[in-house]
Amino acid sequence: MIQFNYETDFKLENEQRIQQWISSCIANYGFTEGEVNYIFCDDDYLLKLNVEFLEHDTLTDIISFDYTLGKLISGDIFISIERVKENAQEFNQTLENEINRVIIHGILHYMGFKDKSDEEKMKMRFEEDNCLKLLPHK
């Protein structure tokens, strides 16, 4: 089950469409959907988590806590709307496109994709793009 939670003044336009898309991406990679919670928040909220749990005193767009067991995808994905808005401007993307990229980025981490090295970042971007192609238009 995929759930969306809001700790800031933001709401996805079509939660059901996004849920179905995430579910199809998970299935396409041969995984099973477990409990996935998205928490949309602001920079301050995410910074506190980053400092407390990861000991990083920096702003970030996403932090994911992975509870995946084998092929059962589960976890909590925290997304800073402020960072995503800034990234959308920086990369000349719409807010919706950038939100969707970050949403699926967390799921891809749960499936084992990394993004520490340049090579891993390229692979992650490739997989994000593949998943974004599966998102049905409004």
Image (cartoon, rainbow, N blue to C red):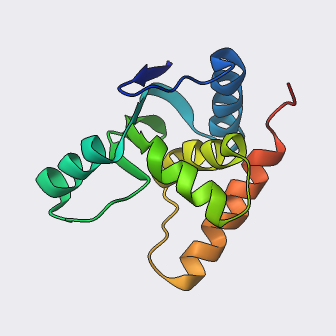
Which of 106 and 78 lies nearest the eye of the viewer? 78
From what the image shows, is residue 34 above or below residue 64?
above
Q: Is residue 46 left or right of residue 41?
A: left
Q: Position of residue 134 (x, y in %)?
A: 81, 40
Residue occupying image coordinates x 44% and y 53%: 61
- The quadrant of the rendering that contains the C terminus is top right
Point out the residue furthest to the right here: 137
Is residue 70 among the parts visible in the rendering?
Answer: no
Which of 56 and 22 lies nearest the eye of the viewer? 56
Residue occupying image coordinates x 54% and y 56%: 86
Residue occupying image coordinates x 46% and y 36%: 73
Residue occupying image coordinates x 46% and y 47%: 82
Q: Position of residue 36 (x, y in %)?
A: 44, 28
Which of 55 and 90 lies nearest the eye of the viewer? 90
Is residue 2 among the parts visible in the rendering?
Answer: yes
Q: Is residue 43 left or right of residue 131?
A: left
Q: Quarter-wise, where is residue 92 in the image? A: bottom right
Q: Is residue 61 left or right of residue 133?
A: left
Q: Quarter-wise, where is residue 56 in the image? A: bottom left
Q: Position of residue 88 (x, y in %)?
A: 64, 55
**Total label count?**
0
Which of 85 and 121 lies nearest the eye of the viewer? 85
Point out the residue furthest to the bottom here: 118
Q: Position of residue 96 (x, y in %)?
A: 69, 39
